[in-house]
Amino acid sequence: SMDWGLVRGPMSGLTRVCSYDRAGYGWSDQGPEPRTSEQIARETERLLEVAEEYVWEGNGRSKIILAGHSMAGFQMRIFQDRNKDLVGGILFADAVNPDFVKGAGFGNRFPSNPVTYFSFWFIAPSIQPIALYLAPLQLFPDDNENVPDFNDRYSYIVSRNQWYETSISEWSAWPENAARTSECGPDKDGDLFDLPIHVFVAQKSSAFDSYEETEQLAQISSQSTLTLLPDASHGFIFEPEYTQALVEALQALMVTQM
């Protein structure tokens, strides 16, 4: 939930904004295996059932706008496929395109690069917790009002074994997630969704083989907006210079529901 700290602050003055730690991340307990995107979508549905009065402030359910980064490209499309009457729009922030998934792992780097595979799944869980304890992440200025104490809190989160266990479980499910997400459309006759979407593409992202993979997500809907960010890396949602563009995109998606 902290990932969207920069965006959540400005948006909260415009509408009801909710973010959460999915199972195994942040302050949430680990969830049942396997950690597929289908399972994560089911858990999100359960969360909305339990927190309905909080989310909609007792006014009854209305359509929601989903915003997600990276692997959330799986989760959001599957959730929308299961809850078509609930989702009014989606913002994809350098999200994975299921049509280009080659195997388990973050993006497509693990199948093609054994060094990366070994480093992340075996070396990082033992080294990174110590490194973060000695030198916490410095993602945001310490005085950023939208994310107080962010660096220390985020460093703590990603230094726990639970973070790595959950990550590995989720990334192992990438082939299954990709297959399930591809079933969400467009349909076999080539008809596009009419769901409003906004796709942000970080052109200097190292998460995928090519930024063009994410760019092609704009083709899944007849009501899509594409924003190319030439100098952005995969983690651009952490960078204040892109906050306003994300907020304006979410505002535009909100307008489509009026």
Image (cartoon, rainbow, N blue to C red):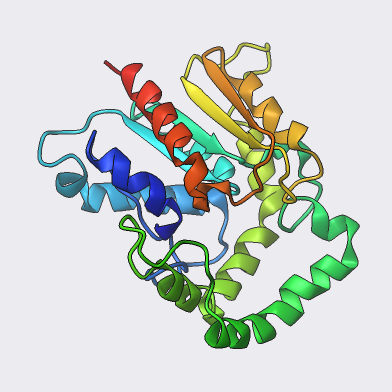
Left or right of 187 in this view: 123:
right
Viewer can see residue 81: no
Left or right of 51 in this view: 105:
right
**Residue 158: x, y in percent?**
53, 73
Residue at the spot x=39%, y=22% of the render? 252
**Residue 87: x, y in percent?**
38, 29
Residue at the spot x=44%, y=28% of the render? 249
Left or right of 125 in this view: 26:
left
Q: In terms of depth relative to the viewer, which is nearer, 238 or 79?
A: 238
**Residue 104: x, y in percent?**
75, 57
Q: In terms of depth relative to the viewer, which is nearer, 18 or 79?
A: 18
Vertical order, 153 against 34 (above or below)? below
Look at the image and tell me in which quarter the N terminus lies: bottom left
Q: Quadrant of residue 124?
A: bottom right
Residue at the spot x=34%, y=51% of the render? 19
Q: Quadrant of residue 95?
A: top right
Q: Residue furthest left?
A: 58
Left or right of 88 in this view: 14:
left
Viewer can see residue 55: yes
Look at the image and tell me in which quarter the C terminus lies: top left
Query: What is the count of numbered marks?
Result: 0
Residue at the spot x=81%, y=44% of the render? 209
